């Protein structure tokens, strides 16, 4: 990483010699950090080449690390002291940064964060995907215009203590211990301003709070969504049941108090799973969606449907997709994992015929509504389907495919379908460099990667999005990577 001072050779030799026999749990060892893991922890090595993951240790830093536990060939450690600091270390903008696990890179300067994310994408493509790209394929990271105040959505865990007080906040890293908060600097300021008063109002109710469903259920999470352009806000309570006396009156109080709040919803999630939202959302007051002016269109975004949390960066991705696809001439673009039509509808507006595929019925309903509201129904169709099955039905009619898969990446059946019936242009927007590298490697027999663009949607976290552009191999002249 540029700007990180490497420790002197003599110091490093001392570190190696002092740890020549360290292999046991609980021992203290001095380590030199040489990189960051996918979740923002420092990465160091013992003399036997075992990897040690250390929270709050930055590349170039040297620190005393207590070895906690070993899993396979990797150790987990805890920092005891630092003997060499990185010049890229800074005071975090959030007072809870040393406890909250939500933003793991707040102590790293913005330029160093950008370098780390670019390196994470390049390393995954080389190490996992086995790619050696020609010059110009791997583009520089698209840096976010705002490092704070960019998140348009929050889902905040709740808990009530024995004394009746309510706590709301994110978890400590690697735990289910809630870190109580009243403010979150990465949230849109209009959402951030609501956290403390909403906590106060919820604390005054007698509603049970039981996010892990250990007792009789109750409130689990507080969800907030704002439309960046219009400022409209929807407040959603996620609960295991609807027995919340006085909810309608409280919802109306919130709408009267804050004119920007256009709706209050109750989402029912009675299942003991990691899925935040349940399948049923009730509108308690107002309406269940916000209106976002996005890429020249008006989109309705519901409380429980997916939309990119960084609106400004999502609009820049629309421009990248349009540049990769070219002007629409009525050819068919398949928009896989289409959600509410975030990326497909702007392409329909530019002249493409768009067929969206998504397995979430609520998202498809909103996609159809958004297409109608923007006079795009004649150019759009949508299918509630498993991705592989939905693709197979229409791939032979398509010129291009755009995929925005979840973190786990593409199922093998999806890759098989894309190889069996290749399209001229394939675009993949990935939120995980490792699964992207794996999937690009599997697609390599039928497609050539022509462009890889890392995009910072999540400043102050270790997450990075990547847009990869692929061309069908028999339609390109260049040899593959």
Image: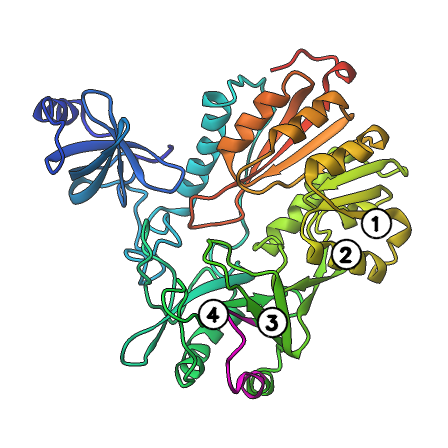
Q: Which residues are magenta?
A: 236-251
Dot label at residue 192: 4
Among numbered discs 4 and 1, the one appearing first in the sequence? 4
Mark pair 4, 2: CA separation: 27 Å
Dot label at residue 296: 2
Element at label 2: loop
Question: Is label 4 in contact with label 2 (beta carbons under 8 Å)?
Answer: no
Question: Is label 1 in contact with label 2 (beta carbons under 8 Å)?
Answer: yes
Q: Mark 1 — residue?
A: 349
Which mark lies nearer to you, 4 or 2?
4
Q: Residue at position x 30%, y 46% from top? A: 89
Q: Mark 3 — residue?
A: 234
Question: Is label 2 in contact with label 3 (beta carbons under 8 Å)?
Answer: no
Q: Crowdedness of circle 3 by 10 Å Cα count: few (<14), some, many (20+)?
A: many
Q: Crowdedness of circle 4 by 10 Å Cα count: few (<14), some, many (20+)?
A: some
Which mark lies nearer to you, 4 or 3?
3
Among numbered discs 1 and 3, the one appearing first in the sequence? 3
Among numbered discs 4 and 3, the one appearing first in the sequence? 4
Mark pair 4, 1: CA separation: 34 Å
Mark pair 1, 2: CA separation: 9 Å
Element at label 3: strand
Q: Residue 330's image quarter?
A: top right
Rendered position, 223 above or below 82: below
């Amino acid at each position: 990483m540029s700007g990180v001072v490497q420790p002197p050779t003599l110091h490093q030799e001392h570190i190696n010699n002092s740890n020549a026999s360290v292999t046991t749990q609980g021992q203290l060892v001095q380590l030199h950090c040489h990189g960051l893991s996918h979740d923002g922890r420092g990465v160091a090595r013992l003399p036997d080449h075992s990897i040690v993951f250390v929270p709050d240790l930055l590349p170039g830093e040297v620190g005393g690390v207590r070895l906690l536990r070993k899993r396979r060939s990797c150790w987990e450690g805890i920092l005891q002291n630092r003997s060499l600091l990185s010049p890229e270390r800074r005071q975090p903008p959030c007072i809870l940064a040393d406890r909250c696990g939500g933003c793991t890179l707040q102590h790293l300067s913005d330029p160093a964060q950008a370098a780390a994310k670019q390196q994470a994408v390049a390393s995954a493509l080389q190490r996992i995907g086995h790619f050696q790209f020609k010059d110009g394929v791997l583009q520089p990271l698209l840096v976010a215009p705002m490092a704070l105040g960019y998140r348009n959505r929050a889902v905040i865990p709740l808990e009530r203590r024995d004394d009746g007080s309510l706590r709301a906040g994110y978890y400590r890293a690697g735990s289910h211990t809630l870190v109580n908060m009243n403010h979150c600097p990465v949230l849109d300021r209009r959402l951030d301003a609501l956290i403390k008063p909403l906590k106060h109002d919820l604390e005054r109710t007698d509603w049970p709070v039981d996010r892990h469903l250990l007792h009789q259920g109750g409130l689990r999470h507080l969800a907030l969504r704002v439309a960046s352009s219009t400022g409209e806000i929807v407040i959603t309570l996620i609960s295991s049941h609807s027995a919340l006396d006085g909810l309608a009156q409280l919802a109306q109080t919130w709408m009267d108090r804050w004119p920007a709040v256009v709706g209050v919803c109750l989402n029912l999630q009675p299942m003991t799973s990691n899925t935040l939202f349940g399948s049923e959302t009730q509108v308690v007051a107002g309406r269940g969606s916000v209106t976002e002016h996005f890429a020249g269109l008006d989109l309705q975004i519901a409380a429980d449907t997916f939309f990119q949390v960084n609106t400004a960066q999502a609009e820049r991705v629309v421009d990248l997709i349009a540049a990769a696809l070219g002007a629409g001439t009525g050819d068919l673009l398949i928009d896989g994992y289409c959600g509410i039509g975030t990326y497909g509808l702007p392409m329909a507006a530019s002249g493409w015929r768009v067929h969206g595929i998504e397995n979430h019925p609520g998202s498809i309903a909103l996609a159809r509504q958004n297409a109608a509201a923007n006079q795009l129904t004649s150019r759009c169709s949508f299918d509630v389907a498993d991705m592989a099955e939905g693709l197979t039905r229409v791939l032979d009619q398509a010129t291009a495919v755009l995929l925005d898969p979840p973190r786990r990446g593409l199922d093998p059946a999806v890759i098989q379908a894309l190889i069996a019936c290749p399209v001229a242009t394939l675009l993949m927007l990935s939120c995980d460099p490792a699964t992207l590298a794996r999937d690009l490697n599997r697609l390599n027999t039928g497609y050539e990667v022509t462009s890889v663009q890392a995009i910072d949607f999540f400043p102050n976290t270790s997450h990075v999005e990547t847009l990869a552009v692929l061309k069908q191999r028999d339609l390109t002249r260049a040899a593959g990577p």
